[in-house]
């Protein structure tokens, strides 16, 4: 659902931009910033912390309060289930984990398996982020209508979410992300083919195909990242992946600008980076069907017991 509404916001952007096409770019900034301010208030008052995360952190009273708020009125079964599971979870609690980002990050660096996984996920996120942020920004270089191009890219995210929803339980994580990234990279390079040999419509179609595969790979990667790390350090690990994803967008404007005279410097670079980064998925374990654990201790027992395919 979060993916879906993200896309709905993306779809609205070209419409707002078209309405503001005769105004200053400052107007577009204002119109797109007001909903974000409202969203922040909604998050503050309506969203709670995960009770599972609170419990792992030893904040039992807050975890119980959240569960009581989630449970139907006069229904004690949810709370009873939680209370009955507390002794087993408590034995595995990471007692050396403080309640801040830096201690979680410290564990990610000290534990070899966690460090290797985080580095691989960061590289993957950087690769798929290069296309995700760069392609919609560079569609003007293809010569097609800029408003329709952005709209088509935004609409493609909807079927990519549907595809992931359908196949997420049956497709392996590593091979799926690898081949989706490879297809994305190849099509991105092809879309940089000189315009005198391909029509605008053909180049636009290839670009849309590349973007579709990238969106699908991104969705898979976001799910995969949550499965690779235990609850106690998952927030920190996935935050690092998202930072790498956004970092790739920093390079996009410069590449798009260079691609105005030679699309190989934009779409070509996007594709090559994605292709190279896709190979970092191979050292990661396969998590399809594996249980998502709560603590570092549980994860290390799982690795030692061979429950994950490394």
Image (tube, grey):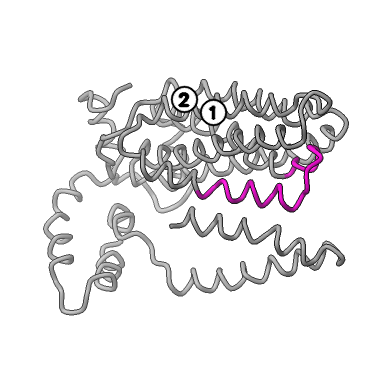
Which residue of the protein is positioned furthest toward the bottom in this rendering? Answer: 74
* Magenta-colored span: 137-158
Q: Position of residue 189 (x, y in %)?
A: 69, 24
Question: Which residue is tagged 1?
Answer: 181
Determine the secondary structure under disc 2.
Answer: helix
Q: Quadrant of residue 20?
A: bottom right
Q: Which one is in front, 272 or 198? A: 198
Identify whether 47 is placed above or below 111. Answer: below
Q: Is residue 145 magenta?
A: yes
Quarter holding the C terminus?
Answer: top left
- Give how far across and how far down residue 39 sits, in percent: 55, 69
Give me the residue at 49% from left, 43% from top. 160
Mark seen at residue 281: 2
* Residue at x 29%, y 23% (from the top left corner): 309
279 to 142, vertically: above or below:
above
Q: Residue at x 56, y 55 (%)?
A: 7
Circles 1 and 2: CB distance less than 8 Å? yes
Q: Give the position of the N terminus as an image quadrant.
A: bottom left
Whichever of callouts 1 and 2 sits on the residue coming sooner in the sequence is 1
Q: Is residue 59 above or below residue 145?
A: below
Near mark 2 (Cα within 10 A), the count class, few <14, some 14-19 or many ≥20, is many
Residue 75, labelled with which disc?
none
Q: Is residue 96 left or right of residue 236?
A: left
Local secondary structure at mark 1: helix
């Amino acid at each position: 659902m979060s993916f879906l509404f993200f896309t709905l916001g993306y779809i609205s952007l070209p419409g707002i931009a078209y309405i503001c096409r005769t105004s200053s770019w400052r107007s577009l900034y204002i119109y797109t910033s007001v909903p974000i301010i409202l969203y922040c208030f909604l998050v503050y008052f309506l969203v709670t912390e995960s009770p599972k995360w609170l419990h792992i952190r030893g904040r039992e009273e807050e975890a119980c309060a959240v569960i009581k708020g989630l449970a139907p009125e006069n229904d004690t079964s949810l709370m009873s289930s939680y209370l009955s599971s507390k002794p087993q979870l408590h034995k595995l609690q990471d007692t050396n984990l403080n309640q801040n980002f830096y201690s979680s990050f410290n564990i990610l660096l000290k534990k070899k398996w966690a460090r290797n996984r985080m580095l691989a996920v960061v590289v993957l996120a950087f690769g798929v982020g290069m296309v995700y942020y760069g392609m919609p920004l560079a569609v003007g270089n293809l010569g097609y209508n800029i408003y329709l191009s952005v709209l088509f890219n935004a609409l493609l995210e909807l079927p990519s979410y549907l595809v992931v929803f359908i196949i997420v339980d049956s497709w392996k994580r590593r091979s799926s992300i690898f081949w989706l990234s490879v297809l994305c990279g190849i099509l991105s390079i092809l879309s940089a083919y000189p315009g005198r040999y391909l029509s605008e419509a053909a180049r636009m179609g290839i670009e849309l195909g590349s973007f579709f595969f990238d969106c699908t790979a991104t969705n898979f990667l976001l799910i995969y990242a949550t499965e690779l790390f235990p609850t106690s350090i998952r927030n920190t690990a996935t935050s690092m992946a998202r930072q790498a994803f956004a970092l790739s967008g920093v390079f996009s404007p410069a590449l798009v600008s260079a691609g105005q005279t030679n699309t190989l410097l934009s779409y070509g670079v996007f594709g090559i980076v994605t292709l190279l980064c896709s190979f970092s998925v191979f050292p990661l374990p396969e998590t399809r069907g594996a249980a998502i654990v709560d603590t570092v201790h549980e994860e290390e027992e799982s690795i030692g017991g061979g429950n994950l395919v490394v």
